[in-house]
Image (cartoon, rainbow, N blue to C red):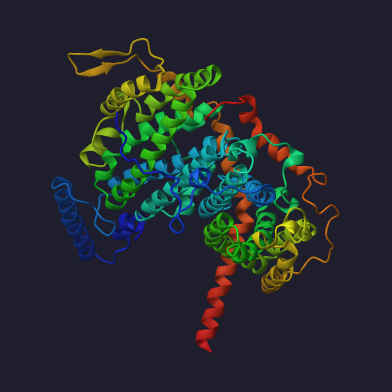
């Protein structure tokens, strides 16, 4: 029996050679607080990847099917690194953490949980999250935890492309037609009240010192860059304060449970199975 | 130049001498084309080619592109539920590859003068054909394995000879596509292998998927040689290199050792090694079902088309915005240069 090629379609991109398998096999074990931080970052990436994956075969143009799938794949890669590293603290695998935690145990922010809506809303969500994540990873590369720093360095290169993709679309939609401007503005309005949660200092970040990046420290720079591109696109910054419950607890979200129900259904029908 | 221009150019010529010159050019073009085919060389976009060759290629390449695009649906449907993160990553990468294949193939068809938008419209209106296998549902996770192993496997057997197709852009697109398809097939095989060697329920899921996809996968090579109207001409033009039945036989011969390694069986009681022929004999396929599915009566034919149309419709405002923005940008640039 032979196959024509032994290459892998999911080869990691060039750059820092890091894979989930390597993190799992390495000697670097996260302590409990660092693991909970990695989990929080990983959950954001995982949930947004799950949302973006739903665009595949539904995008406005074939090139966008490719682009959104690519971003989903990058984020899933980040999630795999982060969940795998978190799992080293508790003897759990990435899949134990992704598929067998309940709604209350996830720490994702509500922004990434928001429904895709139309392409305008998805791009609004992408813009905010990729700008935030870029700011975050730019600083996390200096983490005193070398695994987190390495993950951030690898992810940063990809997020650089994500924010470029989002910014270009904000301009196209904001300055394209009346309808596109109206729709992308509606998208920004729809998700804006979840921006503050990104900058809220929740535990365990506050206990981690130089291992972590304090969310509140990202607020000014991220918002300044967001305001700039939104204004350049002829759109307005929604005038609204943050939604109550900015604590990533899941107690203030209806979306998380639905997302997990779909994501986890098959794995939970076959507990203990390998795939 | 578009095919229509090629075809109609002589009609617009001013006088008879021009018409005669055009005729002479076509004759020498035909001679050159025949030489290219005879010496197994490549026809390139700027070369003269018979209108029927161009048409036949546009049909084949665009159908292939459409198949990649519709094929994203059954597999895309499992991205959200993939049972491990690694499998999810592999599946996203695979479906993304299919979108990429669609892009190369539409581009290859564009070199023949057919605009992409026109091909989209044909798919949208339901006029265009695509591989009927994608009108079957991907019901279980094992179907993702069966699609990879059987459907991509059949596609490879079909497509490897197409890497030598006489039309250059098509042949070159196929080289890259075949490389990617071959790891898709391997990944499908690995999914089935894990399931087959997993729990009882997983094993059963794998066997059922193989049972459902085996027949339709064999039918991907097209009707039997006696009922395949386009095959002979395509072979003479060296677009196709082997007949439908030859390729189907090659595929069955390839599957038997692979299914044994999987620990599964193929759902054909007549499957048997024929020492004399040096090939496996296999039972008749349900061609009534095949033609019913081709006519648009597959289990999910309507769903696939509606899904495609919905995405096109819902994305229209985005494409309009992108065009308006691009036009504005080029106007701004023109104004800058003018100033």
Query: How many tags in the picture?
Result: 0
Q: Quadrant of residue A122?
A: bottom right
Residue B290 lies, in percent from the top left, at 43, 24
Residue B231 lies, in percent from the top left, at 28, 33
> In this image, A215 relative to B186: left or right?
right
> In this image, B77 relative to A201: left or right?
left
Which residue is found at the position 69% from the left and 48% from the top? A36
In front of the other: A203 or B67: A203
Residue A207 at least partly seen: yes
Which residue is found at the position 59% from the left and 40% from the top? A94
**Which quadrant of the rendered structure holds the N terminus of chain B?**
bottom left
Looking at the image, the residue that sits furthest to the top is B269
Q: Quadrant of residue B18?
A: bottom left
In front of the other: A129 or B305: A129
> In this image, B8 relative to A77: left or right?
left
Q: Is residue B271 above or below residue B307?
A: above
Residue B230 lies, in percent from the top left, at 30, 34
Which residue is found at the position 53% from the left and 79% from the top? B333
Which residue is found at the position 26% from the left and 55% from the top? B44
Residue A176 at least partly seen: no
In front of the other: B166 or B71: B71
Looking at the image, the residue that sits furthest to the bottom is B339
Q: Is residue B269 above or below residue B6?
A: above
């Amino acid at each position: 029996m032979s196959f024509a090629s032994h290459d892998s379609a999911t080869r990691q991109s060039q750059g820092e050679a890091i894979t989930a398998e390597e993190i799992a096999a390495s000697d670097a074990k996260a302590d409990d607080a660092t693991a909970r931080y990695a989990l929080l970052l990983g959950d954001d990436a995982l949930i947004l990847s799950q949302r973006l994956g739903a665009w595949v075969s539904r995008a406005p143009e074939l090139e966008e099917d490719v682009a959104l799938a690519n971003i989903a794949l990058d984020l899933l890669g980040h999630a795999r690194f982060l969940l795998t590293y978190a799992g080293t603290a508790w003897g759990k695998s990435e899949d134990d953490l992704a598929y067998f935690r309940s709604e209350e145990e996830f720490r994702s922010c509500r922004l990434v949980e928001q429904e895709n809506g139309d392409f305008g809303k998805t791009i609004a969500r992408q813009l905010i999250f990729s700008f935030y994540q870029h700011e975050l990873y730019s600083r996390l590369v200096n983490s005193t935890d070398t695994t987190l720093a390495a993950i951030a360095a690898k992810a940063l290169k990809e997020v650089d492309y994500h924010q470029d993709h989002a910014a270009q679309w904000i301009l196209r939609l904001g300055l394209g037609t009346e309808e596109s401007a109206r729709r992308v503005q509606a998208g920004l309005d729809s998700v804006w009240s979840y921006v503050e949660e990104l900058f809220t200092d929740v535990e365990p970040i506050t206990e981690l010192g130089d291992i972590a990046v304090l969310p509140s420290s990202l607020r000014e720079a991220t918002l300044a860059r967001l305001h700039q591109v939104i204004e350049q696109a002829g759109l307005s910054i929604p005038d609204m304060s943050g939604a109550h419950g900015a604590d990533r607890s899941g107690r203030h979200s209806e979306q998380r449970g639905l997302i997990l129900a779909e994501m986890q259904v098959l794995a939970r029908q076959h507990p203990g199975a390998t795939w | 130049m578009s095919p229509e221009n090629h075809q109609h150019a002589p009609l617009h010529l001013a006088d008879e001498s021009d018409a005669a010159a055009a005729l002479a050019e076509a004759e020498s073009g035909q001679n050159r084309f025949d030489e290219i085919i005879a010496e197994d060389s490549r026809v390139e976009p700027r070369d003269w080619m018979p209108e029927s060759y161009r048409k036949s290629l546009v049909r084949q390449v665009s159908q292939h592109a459409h198949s990649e695009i519709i094929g994203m649906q059954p597999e895309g449907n499992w991205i959200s539920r993939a049972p491990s993160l690694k499998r999810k990553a592999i599946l996203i990468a695979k479906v993304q590859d299919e979108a990429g294949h669609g892009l190369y193939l539409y581009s290859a068809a564009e070199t023949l003068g057919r605009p992409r938008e026109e091909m989209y419209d044909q798919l949208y209106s339901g006029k265009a054909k695509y591989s009927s296998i994608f009108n079957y549902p991907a019901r279980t996770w094992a179907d993702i394995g069966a699609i990879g192993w059987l459907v991509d496997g059949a596609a490879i057997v079909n497509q490897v000879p197409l890497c030598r197709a006489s039309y250059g852009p098509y042949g070159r697109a196929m080289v890259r596509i075949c490389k990617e398809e071959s790891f898709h097939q391997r990944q499908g095989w690995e999914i089935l292998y894990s399931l087959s060697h997993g729990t009882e329920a997983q094993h059963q899921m794998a066997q059922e998927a193989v049972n459902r996809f085996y027949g339709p996968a064999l039918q991907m090579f097209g009707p039997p040689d006696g009922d395949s109207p386009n095959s002979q001409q395509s072979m003479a033009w060296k677009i196709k290199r082997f007949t439908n039945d030859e390729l189907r036989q090659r595929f069955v011969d390839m599957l038997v050792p692979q299914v044994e390694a999987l620990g599964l069986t193929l759902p054909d009681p007549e499957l048997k090694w024929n020492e004399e022929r040096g090939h496996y004999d296999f039972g008749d396929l349900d061609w009534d079902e095949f033609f019913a599915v081709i006519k648009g009566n597959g289990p999910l034919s309507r769903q696939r088309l509606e899904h495609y149309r919905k995405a096109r419709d819902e994305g229209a405002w985005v494409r309009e915005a992108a065009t308006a923005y691009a036009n504005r940008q080029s106007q701004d640039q023109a104004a800058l240069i003018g100033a």
